[in-house]
Image (cartoon, rainbow, N blue to C red):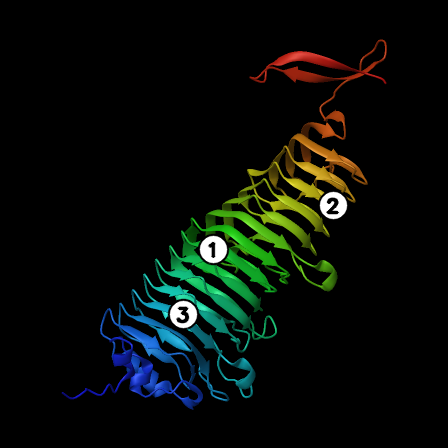
Amino acid sequence: MSLQKITSYTQIRGGIPNVLDFGAKGDGTTDDTAAIQAAINSLPQYGTLNFAAGTYVISSTLTIGTNNITLQGNATIIAKANVQFEYMLSTASINNLTIKDLEFDVNQANRVSGQTVRFAGLSINGNFNTITNIVVSNTLGYNSVPAAAIGVIGNNNLIQGCQVINCGGTSGTNASDGIYTGGNQTIISNCIATNCTDTAFVLENSNYGLITGCTAYDCSCGAGISTYTATTNTGNVINGLTVKNWNATNTGGVSIGVVTPVAGTLYDTIVSNVVMSADVGSGYGTGSAIKIRNAGVGRVKQITVSNCIVDGASVHGIDCDGDVISVTGCRVKNVTSNCIQFVSGYENYASSNYVYGGAYGINIGGTASVITQNNVCLNQTSWGIYAFDTSYVSSIMNYVKNTAVGAISKASGATLEMVGIEGNNFAINNAVGSATSGSVVNKFVVTDRNGNSLGYVPIYTI
């Protein structure tokens, strides 16, 4: 009886095709582009391609043109030095693709000389695709157009457990996002971004997208939900995000809004369970921590910011420019300007927040209308709560103490309706008239639950 000679790596591994079967070497020196592309092209639908452990050098973009395939392995794919091509891997309208357990090194340091294109990582276009446990590093934007380590456009896509590292150069000229997505029902889950010079995690022109369980270290912006064109986008959520040391004057550490002067609308957005900290003394934390913003004729509406923690910012803690914005249950401290700020909009609400330090605890300006209720404002260098310009503020049972200038007040053109607590004292601003006898010097109105007057309560001299 004779023995059959096993001649292919696929046979050794039990029948799953491997790039080594197509001539790839994985030795970190050989150009394996043609071999890997041939292996990808050979896959039928529902096929799987393995990358054996090693380092595979490529000199042009790998492309995928088949639905329902899987690329996997414990290997590194690195861009060849001194070669100009944009994406490490790219697809066009491909569905049900899975890429997992691979590392892509875009190798910017050895390609930047004579750069003519962006150096990006993965560009995935299609639906129901899954990118999991992928590492992408060393991307680089070009000619003021950011690159992205992982870019996914389409619907019902999942990016999970991925890492993006050292992406981008000087922010604004050759910057790079970490994970950039657009489309509907995209999930970015349990991912880590480190040293990305644009935004770590992006949902742009998206609906019902989710960023959850993610962490951004030393990135220009930790996360962004944005409308970039004249579209209406809704239902996006950030729930569970840690941001350490952002630097983004325009966007802030977390950016929510319409970011270009177009007639777009972003509404019904939730930002919750976000923990942000910045070492301001070392130059981090530039810009507001959480910034809700409008640009041009676009508008941001119905935004909820809840259970967030901010420790350090060079400007404001939570900076709001929009309508029907609710800020609840947040803790803000160690900011330079305002802990919570509203610059415009109607039917805004701030409740049950704890703000410590800063110039103002809650600052309301422009024509904004805001209900402030059950907030604690401590140790501000100016006022605890202040209404500027022609804003309207209803201040209900807020606790303000140890402010340098005063507790709660307003500019001459603003409207302030107040009942609350200043230190250990009951405080109101609707005392009217003057009594004529004894030591009674003032009075205020008491009403029933329907707003009907029950009469006056006299105020006596102490």
**Residue 147 as seen in the image, left or right of residue 60:** right
Q: Position of residue 410 (x, y in %)?
A: 73, 37
Tell which circle, 3 or 1, labels the residue nearer the N-terminal end. Answer: 3
The mark that comes first in sequence, 2 or 1, is 1
Identify the secondary structure beneath mark 3. Answer: strand
Q: Amino acid at mark 1?
A: Ala
Q: Which mark is residue 263?
A: 1
Circle 3 Cα neighbour tier, 10 Å, few/some/many (<14 / 14–19 / ≥20): some
Instruction: Tally the numbered discs.
Output: 3
Which residue sits at x=34%, y=83%? 36
In the picture, the disc for residue 101 is 3
Relative to 198, is 131 on the left or the right? left
- Label 3, label 2: how many angstroms apart (C-alpha)? 46 Å
**Is there any visible trace of residue 317 in the rendered image?**
no
Does residue 256 appear in the picture of this structure?
yes
Single out the mark in the foreground, 3 or 2: 3
- Secondary structure under tag 1 reads loop
Mark 1 neighbour density, 10 Å: few (under 14) some (14–19) many (20 or more): some
